[in-house]
Amino acid sequence: MNPPTSLPDRRSFLKSSSAGVASLIAAPYVARGQGDASPIKVGLVGCGGRGSGAAAQALNADKGAVLWSMGDAFESNLNASLKRFQEGSKGESGQVQVADERRFVGLDAYRKVIDSGVDVVLLATPPGFRPQHLRAAVEAGKHVFCEKPMAVDAPGVRSVMESAQMAKAKGTCLVSGFCWRYSKSRRAVFERVLDGDIGDIRAYHATYYTGPVKPMRPESARPGGMGDVEWQVRNWYNFSWLGGDGLVEQAVHSVDKVSWAMGDQPPIAAVANGGRTRPNHEGNIFDHFSVIYEYPNGVLGAMSSRQTPNCFNENADYIVGTNGRCVINGGRVGLENARGKNMWRFRSREDNNMYQEEHDTLFAAIRSGEAPNDGDWMATSTMLAILGRMAAYTGQRITWEDALQSSTDLAPDDLEFGDSFDPGGVPQPGVTKFA
Ligand SMILES: NC(=O)c1ccc[n+]([C@@H]2O[C@H](COP(=O)([O-])OP(=O)(O)OC[C@H]3O[C@@H](n4cnc5c(N)ncnc54)[C@H](O)[C@@H]3O)[C@@H](O)[C@H]2O)c1
């Protein structure tokens, strides 16, 4: 797959990298298969719902995988996750070896997990931290499973692109959490679409209509003395610097499929609407987006998302080609000809567990010494969602090139729990400026 137009190629990356990176590439790490019996030590960063699931899938993927260390911003979240592993509801008992001294709490827990002697790091915190965590893991020569989205702003995406190039140069694995790419049914249908079974793609319409995802408690419930940063991290979904907003955090799965169908080539530009309709809604995110991505030759990608209760829910993909149509809606995955007649259907009972497949791929690669790297397309898909959010926040038509070069960094990397931090108000189209 081709990288986006402005992704630095390896040569320009080498030129522009720091001396540290350059020397690392001058003496490349030679990836070696880890044999069939030796333990593969896994470190989990972010022990919430997805992180715990990913760690269970890692243990399931390889009987030699061992959960070796865990890190979370909050002790209670780490303990709750660890307890489920220790009680045997996830993984086999011998595979859980998180000694007391390898349980790390706080915003610097990721570094301690990375330095705890692990081979693989699973990154599953809120995405605002991902570029920093990914860089540290790749620099330390770890194999990485990296949940989506990979960043929340353009500087973050540029950092992820560099980290992905570093992982390639080192020969370490980088597997993304864009799970549909690991689904048997979606792979089968996208292979057919990309092979031209419905002709040339003219338009893609994706929907992601759900209820609120992680609604926050009102500011009045904030315990006295709790700093801004801790309060916001505890309610991360509702702050764009941490979660990226609904289009980037949740609907990015659909945006990723749009990008997949377009051959992972970036669009020319995007125009979007968005806003929030729910009163007394805390945080600074929107609750609906409607984006049109303009691709070459007049091809349009439309992404519509909503996180409002008591409305019509749907998560579907409709791809219109010159000779037919592709419809993906839950278990319905198929192609129709131009007269609406079924041409091909995926039998849903033949589908796989895409989350498990991600880890089966990662651990088989570690064993064999291969180095899958999802970096190029995972960065493109993340940036595509950020571009849509930028267009909605500002009310402007924004080009891919401008978006990718954006200097807007939503938060510094060195915040601490006690810090005061103004996350910014709710953006206002026509008033909020692109930068
Ligand atoms: N691929 C998928 O289908 C899928 C599904 C759900 C979530 N996700 C992604 O997984 C990530 C986590 O989502 P979740 O639903 O598990 O959220 P969650 O709130 O359940 O878990 C996040 C955990 O990270 C911890 N955390 C926050 N900041 C941290 C930091 N700086 N260092 C260490 N730990 C930190 C939190 O305390 C919490 O325990 C998000 O990026 C989300 O988009 C992906």
Image: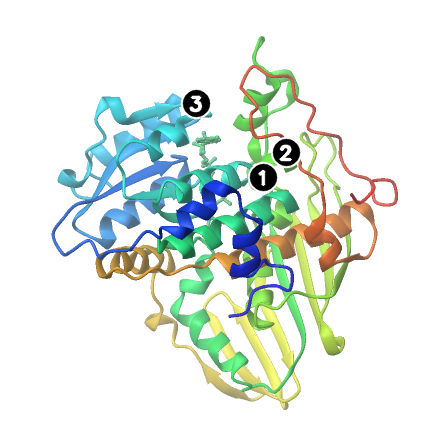
Q: What secondary structure is found at the residue carrying circle 2?
A: loop
Look at mark 1 in the image and give the residue it sits on.
243
Q: CA distance from mark 2 to mark 1?
A: 6 Å
- For the point 57% across and 23% down, the residue is 415
Label 3 Cα neighbours within 10 Å, binned few <14 / some 14-19 / many ≥20: few
Type of the residue with mark 1? Gly
Q: Within 8 Å of ligand 1, the CB of disc 1?
A: yes
Can you identify the residue that label 2 sits on? 239
Residue position marked by numbered label 3 in the rendering: 106
**What residue type is disc 2 on?**
Phe
Where the C terminus falls, by quadrant? Answer: top right
Mark closer to the chain start, 3 or 1: 3
Residue appearing at x 38%, y 76% in the figure: 347
- Disc ID at residue 344: none
Q: Quadrant of residue 317?
A: bottom right
Asked if the residues shown at circle 3 and circle 1 are in contact, with their CB atoms under 8 angstroms apart, the answer is no
Q: Residue at x 40, y 52 (%)?
A: 26
Q: Is residue 353 above or below residue 323?
A: above
- Amino acid found under the numbered disc labelled 3: Gly
Q: Is mark 3 within 8 Å of ligand 1?
A: yes
